[in-house]
Amino acid sequence: MSAEKSDPQDAGFFRCPVQADQSKAVIRVGHRKAMAMVQETSIDGFTVLVPPKYGSVLKVGRPWLLEYQGARIEVHPQWFFNSPDGRVQMGLRRMRDLTPPEPIRRSLLLRYAGRRYEDPSYSAAVFGGFVLALFTLMALPGLGDSLGTANRIQSAVRWLLNGLNHSINQLM
């Protein structure tokens, strides 16, 4: 491992220090893994510290995978610094996120009615049907009379039908 200079573009990004209790990470190179501590994060990558016993695991030229806080990120080593105590500080550039997405939760309607209801417009149709059924119940003579809504809904429907009838008669 050799010490290289940092990329000049790194200076443009804000680096956030990571608290020690949230710094545990694993670097995977092939089937081997190395424990690491993330010291800083930024939009373009990470600064990590690796104990001396894992220095032989980290081979340049193969893809690296950083597992940190539930995320799986493909990284590329940019620079190394060997400290006097044997630990290795590295700058890792973020290449791509390999974290599997969370599974999509299925609705109750999909479970019982089939896959055709995956489209979100069906939930609007179901809601519209529910509102129409509710108004129909409130307009029924028995239930609507006891609630006091039957006369109002029936007169609103008559007004709407008379308005449509008048508009159609004007067109003809």
Image (spheres, rainbow, N blue to C red):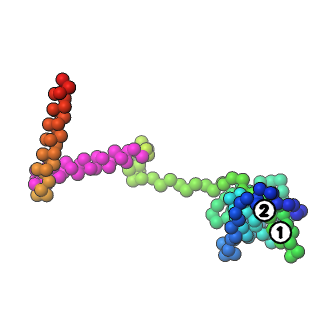
Q: Secondary structure at mark 1?
A: strand
Residue identifier under label 2 = 91
Residue at 69% over, 75% down = 20
**Label 1 vs label 2, nearer the camera:** 2
Amino acid type indicated by mark 1: Val
* Relative vertical location of residue 87 with respect to residue 166 in this rendering, above or below: below
| Residue 66 seen in render | no
Q: Residue visible at 75% across and 65% down?
A: 47
Please provide percent x and percent y for residue 156.
16, 45
Position of residue 120 measured from the top left corner of the image (x, y, whole percent): 42, 46
Magenta segment, prevailing SS (helix, strand or loop): helix
Q: Are marks 1 and 2 in contact (CB under 8 Å)?
A: no
Compare residues 32 and 61 and report the one nearer the observer: 61
- Expressed as whole percent of the image width and height from the top left, the position of residue 63 reads 77, 54
Nearest the eye: 132 or 109: 132
Residue 138 among those drawn in magenta: yes
Residue range highlighted in magenta: 120-145
Which of the numbered marks, if any, corresponds to residue 88?
A: 1
